[in-house]
Image: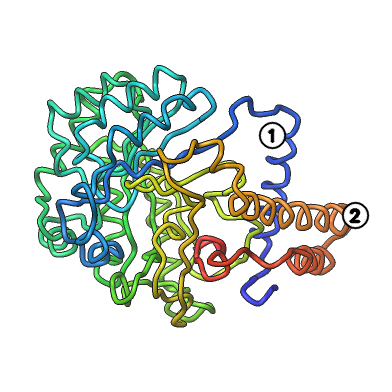
Amino acid sequence: MGKFSFLLPKNIERSLKALRDRSVQREIPEKRRWRLLQVESAMACNLRCVMCPWRKIAENVENRGLMSQEIWQSIRPHLSEIKSIDFTGGGEPLLQPKLPEWIAEAHAAGCESGFLSNGLLLKKEKLQQILNAGVDWICVSMDGADAQLYEKIRVGSNFERVCENVAEIAELRTGKVPKTMINFVLMDLNFHQVEDIVRLASQLGVDQLNFKQCEVIRGESGKGHGLFGAEETKKIRRLKKSLEKARHLAIKLNIATTAFAFTPTERSVCEQDPRDSLFVRYDGLAAPCINLAIGGPTTFLGKEVHMPEVHYGRLPDTDLMELWQSQTCKFYRQQFDQRAKKHDAAIVSGMLNASGSNRLKALQQAKEAMPEPPPGCNVCHYLYDI
């Protein structure tokens, strides 16, 4: 079970922090049933990005790859039980004509909402509609800090226009709402620009910069661009050092940053956490996450494997609560609940009075105490913090 675990002090602290956070959550129960509902408002896209894993899949979609109003209407009665809605999936949310309306309905129900976009269609009129609707965050994918590289990666886009659109958010928003972020997918093509993208984010008035690994692959789509590996190498050490330098620059420029690991460390549960979240595909199929919603051949830490499709059922044919109580959904929730409980119990019993190498041993025992991940999750980079 500990095959991909690298037991460094920072990983110990991360495990302890996660344990403390869960303890606080148990003391103050969350009133809403779902922490997150990820709603794929559109599978269709207006770009042809070189690393996109969904491009070929999106060529054969129903309803032009747009979620129907009927599916959204089946979600609407449950909004009061949802804490946060992410309108992102495998496509471009701004192609969904109903997006401002759906954001407004989510906002009226007290849901936090936001979406990830390529930013090309985020012109002033559309942006104002979305701001008026009450959106809480907007994240824009920008994988190059100059026009030449950006447009080489995000084929069909326009660097200058996207920069103008992103800068417009800071000009039109009220205070710091919506929070504005940039996603930068790390690849051989663009890694030399990690400091340049920090400077660009500062110029555009962005609040946060997320350095993402190119970790989702379907067949040949997205393959060969990732910089992470099963073990730390000289190259990875060099990349980590360069990225850390860029993140220090971001601190000086008052920009928050996030980054995933370059080497795997198995977690008890991924950030998506199917115990209190759902992914709803553009056609109404519900799943634990987007990876399990769209299965197929993939690559996991350099090995060719298959990602299964896992579906709970379909909206609006079945009510959201019925999908939540389905046997498959219960299995995924219970499996991760058991993993988290076993992991946390082992940490508490083995680490409270331990120190040094004993703490490292206790953390390894905690990982070994966990049941196997559910099907699909065992070959998903997200469970290994990549």
Residue denoted by label 2: 353
SS state under label 2:
loop
Whole-percent x, y for residue 226 in the image = 37, 71
Instruction: Classify 10 Å Cα crowding around label 2: few (below 14), some (14-19), many (20 and above).
Output: few
| Residue at x-position 39% and y-position 65% | 216
| Left or right for 320, reference 48 | right
Whole-percent x, y for residue 258 in the image = 45, 50
Residue denoted by label 1: 25
Instruction: Classify 10 Å Cα crowding around label 1: few (below 14), some (14-19), many (20 and above).
Output: few
| Residue at x-position 27% and y-position 35% | 205
Whole-percent x, y for residue 314 in the image = 43, 46
| Residue at x-position 46% and y-position 60% | 292
| Left or right for 9, reference 178 | right
Amino acid at pointer 2: Asn
The image quadrant where one finds the N terminus is bottom right
Whole-percent x, y for residue 220 in the image = 29, 76
